Amino acid sequence: MGQTMEQDSAAAGAARAGIRRRSAWLALGAAVTTALGVAEAVQALPLPQDELQRQCWTQYTRARTRPGKDPTTVDFSNLRNGYTVRSPFLVAFAVRGMGVAPAGKPFKGTGHHHVLIDTPLPRDIGATIPFSDTHKHFGKGQTFATLDLPPGPHTLRLLFADHEHRPYFVYSPEIRINVAGRRSAEPLKIDPKRFDETCAAWYQDEVSRPRPPGEWLGLANLREGEPVTSPFTLHFGVEGFGVCAAGQTAERSGHFVVQLLQSGKALQTLNLSNGATQSTLSLPNGSYELKLRFVDGASGRDLLPAHEQPLLVTAQERM
């Protein structure tokens, strides 16, 4: 079932070459509209073309895709304690063991995200979370958000709450970040003579770069052509819609369906009808195709064009 190292290297090289030939990502994959008004599928974010940037990005692949151990938890999937970012910056939400449903939609085992900014956890866990500049609500079932904070140190924490904004005992560790200033279109530079230091700065800035506007569907933690070690976790993101577990209905909402193929043959389908926003896969070394759909909970119809992305498994982690 496994590939040789030479085959893996050739496959990864071919994937990177294919990415460099793509011109559709000139605007960072911004969604476009056809003459019929239907959003076209957005290309997966490619690996950086610059060799130093690609080396830097891929050395963090395992950290972004390693499965978690806690059965129920929330966390920022792109930020870590001590990161330095430029504002505005992306915060991507990850929840495991529960599903997402918008506020006002009671459904067992689901909730929605809140970001606490420079503020402690609520003392009264039975009280509803207030609406304020330090308590950001994402009651439409969002999978990520863009924050714009002034320069300086800040604390962030994710808090998961039910349909009435009452907290579950599910929250992330508090992380401290530093906002270095305003974001520009130009990425930071990696100095080969100071690779470790400048790679870390570039990566923290890049992983927090906001996604393009418009409606899109895709993987939040893996780029096209990026080799992975199995088992690995994929985080799914959607813009323009919220996630809602099947069994409830909400405007402009749906849930994820994941289809895994190899050489065009379907291997498995995961219907995340409970509102889950991530899946952990365990696969032998080889090349696969991932088809991510976002469907209406009542009719099962696609709300966005499916996102298709190759997967390249090159190693196995001993558990």
Image: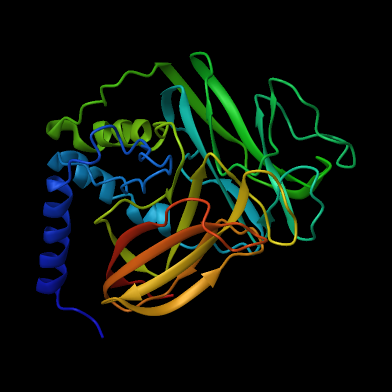
Residue at 70% in and 26% down? 119
| Picture mark count | 0
Q: Is residue 173 left or right of residue 2?
A: right
Q: Is residue 223 left or right of residue 180?
A: left
Q: Is residue 146 left or right of residue 35?
A: right
| Residue 220 visible in the snapshot | no
Please identify the quadrant where the N terminus is shown: bottom left
Q: Residue 28's spot in the image, x, y percent?
A: 30, 35
Q: Quadrant of residue 180?
A: top left
Residue at 13% in and 46% down? 20
Residue at 44% in and 60% down? 292
In the picture as drawn, the residue positioned furthest to the front comes out as 36
Tell me: residue 168, above or below residue 121: below
Residue at 56% in and 64% down? 69
Q: Is residue 75 left or right of residue 226?
A: right
In the picture as drawn, the residue positioned furthest to the bottom comes out as 1
Depth check: give the residue in front, 222 or 194: 222
Please identify the quadrant where the C terminus is shown: bottom left
Q: Residue 64's spot in the image, x, y percent?
A: 41, 52
Q: Residue 259's spot in the image, x, y percent?
A: 44, 70
Q: Residue 296's spot in the image, x, y percent?
A: 61, 57
| Residue 271 visible in the snapshot | yes
Depth check: give the residue in front, 128 or 56: 128
